[in-house]
């Protein structure tokens, strides 16, 4: 079974939903994948139902309207999220291509994926379970790319050094 087939099975049509969102993003200009699914492009993947994107901020309302008009699987468990945080806009110019679920997709570069995870990890408004997942993603990244630890806060570097 391929990763695409597993994703589609686990998310009840989420892979098809993901493909439609990518097609829409491609037609609206610069975009890139961020978050856990982007982390999976750099390290051994884990399953996630959350898919985060950065798009050119002024085009987001148009993109959202276009997606609402498209036929998307209502039963899909995939959760598509677009960030409106301006800090992520710079990621667009540094995005790279990668294969995600059998589709060529623009993803944030490794340093930007890491920075986004650091912002999420440090956000006290996020649920503990989300921040813990962000911490795990950061640990996974540092285990594969030890030089990234220089970007990490002291407590996370110490945790990694003990590990």
Image (tube, rainbow, N blue to C red):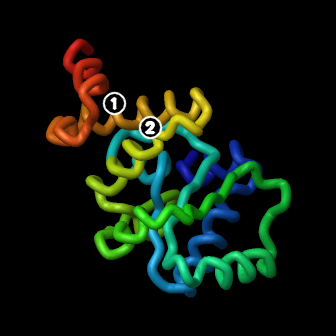
Please identify the quadrant where the N terminus is shown.
top right
Judged left or right of residue 147, residue 98 is: right
**Cα distance in 3D space between marks 1 and 2:** 11 Å
Q: Nearer the viewer, residue 31 or 57?
A: 57
| Residue under the point 41% across and 46% down | 119
Query: In terms of sequence position, does the residue under pointer 1 or pointer 2 come before the other?
Result: 2
How would you rate the neighbour count of disc 1 (Cα within 10 Å): few for under 14, some for 14-19, many for 20 or more? many
Residue for point 41% across, 36% down: 137
Residue projecting furthest to the top: 162
When asked about the image quadrant of residue 104, the answer is: bottom left
Residue 59 in the image: state x and y as whole percent: 58, 83
| Residue drawn at 55 percent across, 62 percent down | 83
Disc 1: which residue: 139
Left or right of 82: which side holds 90? left
Q: Residue at x 23, y 13 (%)?
A: 162
Q: Residues within 10 Å of mark 2 (few under 14, many from 20)?
A: many
Is residue 148 or residue 73 the one in the foreground?
A: 148
Pair 1/2: label in front: 2
The residue where tag 2 is placed is: 121
Callout 2: SS = helix
Image quarter of the C terminus: top left
Comparing 146 with 59, the one in front is: 59
Position of residue 31 measured from the top left corner of the image (x, y, whole percent): 47, 74
Element at label 1: helix
User: Measured along the vertical axis of the image, is residue 132 above or below residue 141?
Assistant: above
The image shows residue 78 at horizontal and vertical percentages of 69, 52
Report x, y in % for residue 34.
Answer: 46, 57
């Amino acid at each position: 079974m391929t990763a695409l087939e597993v994703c589609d099975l686990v998310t009840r049509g989420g892979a098809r939903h993901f493909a439609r969102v990518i097609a829409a993003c491609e037609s609206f200009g610069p975009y890139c994948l961020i978050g856990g699914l982007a982390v999976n492009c750099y390290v051994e993947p884990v399953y996630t139902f959350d898919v985060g994107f950065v798009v050119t901020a002024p085009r987001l309302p148009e993109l959202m309207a276009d997606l609402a008009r498209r036929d998307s699987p209502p039963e899909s468990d995939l959760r598509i999220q677009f960030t409106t945080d301006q800090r992520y806009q710079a990621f667009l110019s540094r995005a790279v291509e990668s294969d995600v679920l059998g589709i060529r997709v623009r993803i944030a570069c490794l340093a930007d994926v890491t920075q986004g995870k650091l912002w999420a990890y440090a956000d006290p408004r996020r649920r503990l379970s989300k921040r813990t997942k962000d911490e795990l993603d950061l640990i996974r990244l540092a285990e594969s790319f030890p030089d990234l630890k220089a970007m990490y806060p002291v407590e996370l570097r110490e945790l990694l050094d003990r590990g």
